[in-house]
Structure formats: structure tokens, C-alpha cells
Image (spheres, rainbow, N blue to C red):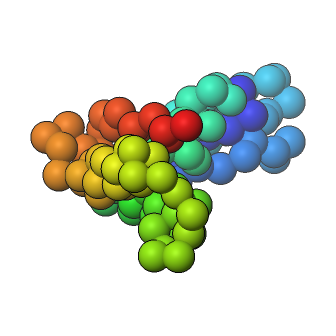
Amino acid sequence: MPYFQCTNGSLHFLSADDISRDGVLLLPEGAKAVTDIVAAAIQSPEPSNTELAAELRQRRGELLAETDYLMTPDYPIDAAKLAAMKSYRQALRDIPGKPDFPKQVVWPQLPN
């Protein structure tokens, strides 16, 4: 256990100074030793809904940008493919309005 967590939640790496000659951990009062796995979870908590929503909106924007050129009036695309692309892009725009957003997202399939 190379880490310990203080009562304020801060995480610290155990050093040789934190171990007595007898091999006993010398931690601050109230601190507890934690495993690498627990330390990783503390250092990388799950993103908040706001952070997750921002990441998903960014990805959605990237997907829309990848097909922007198809929407220009002078791009040679037949009517059926244009309609399918418009539906795809609308489905992307509708994602943030879904009830389970941002925890659950079903991405639409890019039409052929």
C-alpha cells in the first residue's frame, strides 16, 4: 500500500519516513492506508454529469462537423442520401434532449 488518505480526503504517497523500523505505518491521526486501486479511483473520479455532458456535446459537434460539407447547396448528393444525412444530423442534435442524457447515449449510425 504505497498511499495513505488523510481525513480531509487528500491522497499522499507513502515514503520511507512513514514506516517505523518495526515495519509499522506511522500515519497522521485519522489517516488510512489505501491500495493502488483505491488511490487510482480517488485520483480519477468519474466525471460529473456536467463534465460528461460537455464531452458528449463536443463529440456530437465533431460528428456534425464531419458531415457539414454534405449540407452545402452545391455539393453533389442525391435526394435520398441527403434526406438520410439530414435525419442523421437531426438525431445527433436530439441527443442532449433524451431523458437519460448524459448517462446513456445511443449514437445514430452514419448513413452510407
Determine whether, in the image, residue 74 is placed left or right of residue 57.
right
Q: Is residue 6 left or right of residue 105?
A: right
Q: Residue at x 80, y 24 (%)?
A: 23
Q: Nearer the viewer, residue 59 or 70?
A: 70
The answer to whether residue 60 of the structure is visible from this angle is: yes
- Left or right: 57 in relation to 38: left
List x then y, in percent, for residue 62: 54, 61
Q: Please name the residue shown 29% across and 54% down the image.
A: 90
The quadrant holding residue 104 is top left
x, y (%) of residue 47?
42, 49
Residue at the spot 50% in from the left edge and 40% down from the top edge = 110
Residue 76's spot in the image, x, y percent?
A: 57, 63
Measured as percent of width and height from the top left, residue 60 is found at 44, 56
Q: On screen, 34 above or below 95?
A: above
Q: Quadrant of the C terminus?
A: top right
Look at the image and tell me whether residue 29 can be seen. Answer: no
Q: Nearer the viewer, residue 105 or 38?
A: 105
Q: What is the total number of numbered labels drawn onto the structure image?
A: 0
59 or 26: nearer the viewer? 59
- Foreground pick, 81 / 32: 81
The residue lying at 52 percent from left, 57 percent from top is: 77
Q: What quarter of the picture does the N terminus occupy?
A: top right
Is 37 on the left or on the right of 8, as rendered? right
Q: Is residue 109 above or below residue 98?
A: above
